[in-house]
Image (spheres, rainbow, N blue to C red):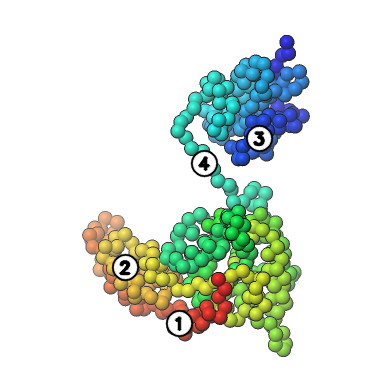
Amino acid sequence: MSRTHIRDFHDDDLDAVVRPWEEVHGAEESPVYSLAEMIASCQADHAVVATRDDALVGVAVGRAAHAQGWIVFFGVAAVPQSDQISAGLLDALERRMAPLGLGKLSILLAEGQEPLAALTANGFEVRDPLRYLEREMPVQRRELDLLKEVGGRILPRHLWRAVSGMRQEKDLLEERLVTPLSRPDMAERFGVVPPRAVMLFGPPGTGKTTFAKAVASRLDWPFVEVFPSRLADGSSSLAGALRTTFEKIGELEHAVVFIDEVEEIASRRGGTPPSPTQGVTNELLKLVAEFRERDGRLLICATNFVRALDAAFLRHGRFDYVIPIGLPDGEARAAIWNRYIPAAAAEATDVAALVTASDGLTPADIEYAARRASQEALARALRAGEGVGPESGAGDDAAPLATDDYLRALAATRATVSAEAVSDFVTDIDEYARL
């Protein structure tokens, strides 16, 4: 009778261990651990194999995380005495990993997967009900250094939810940008081509940068902000540095690239003598065209002065959409006020009155007024001797701020966007917006 031998995994076994993995997972669309992960664990973690007549008939692969051990793959061929082989493999893997100080050895299985009976027969208990959750990492390890080199970063996932109000703008960005890029299968079904480049325009301080970051957060893609003014140095021109930066960004699997105040490098060309930035504008036009040729990328440019942009920059074929971002609506202003009003002052503050009084202000204007009111209230309390020492209880029962405090701060706040700028913005929507 042939004898089964259980031993440690050798690199020569690599081709052989692929076959049992394919037998177990061949019909599954998304196994818990991929073939690449199983192979990596064989080489870097812990693996034992069972052989009979020089043929591999079983394999068990594990990895450890702190005091928790995980079986990455376990499979035994349909051969005589497979139960004994299963028990021997599991025991061998446990002995191999025991010196790591593990408190538990676990395995995740797809519904109906074959090794369940062998595992339960060898002391594993089914923990029911449990749910397995996972998510992809937005940047793989090999891209981290590159992302750092281009000044990119991964943004928190809550930024999209944090943009309160502005429902029309959010709905538009969700429909035009987020859904086609995050669900390309759905976009293809409806004949929608995922966007490659968009332009946001509007008065200063209206949140164009916030929306760009929110889109990157929603997509779970790295966010890379390009600052043209910081690119040029003594060794290269601005146009050359811009090209080098885009070439590096092109090595990332996904990226949202953001250029704010793009009018600085994409202003109208012409005149005698030519504008100093004309060469940069020419280069940027080429880069946008090249950028559009690859999937997994989104270029977002923002401008306060859409009228100043070169006509070729906004034409069809370069930017899929030209989207206006205006002043915050009432819902957005209420959310901004609630963000800065302290809990102790909430009941004494009429937020609806502040929303009305702050119509026409940018988010930054409202933040300034709220902080000014808080600072004035603190100074007033100090002058009155309230709460000066750590043991003082003076003023603890009184609300530190009320509606009048905020209204006084609003009266002293100068609006960033003038009535003339608002009027120009409305005109620009009719002339330049492309939705």
Picture residue at 63% right of the left edge, 75% below the top: 314
Residue under label 2: 351
Mark found first going from the N terminus, 1 or 4: 4
For badge 3, the amino acid type reads Gly
Q: In terms of image quadrants, where is residue 149? A: bottom right
CA gap, disc 1 and disc 4: 50 Å
Picture residue at 62% right of the left edge, 21% below the top: 86
Q: In terms of image quadrants, where is residue 318? A: bottom right
Residue under label 3: 26
CA gap, disc 2 and disc 4: 40 Å
Residue under label 4: 133
Check the image and name the residue furthest to the front: 190
Up the image or down, 202 lies above or below 22; here it is below
Helix, strand or loop at mark 4: loop
Residue under label 1: 418
User: Considering depth in this image, is 407 or 386 the residue closer to the camera?
Assistant: 407
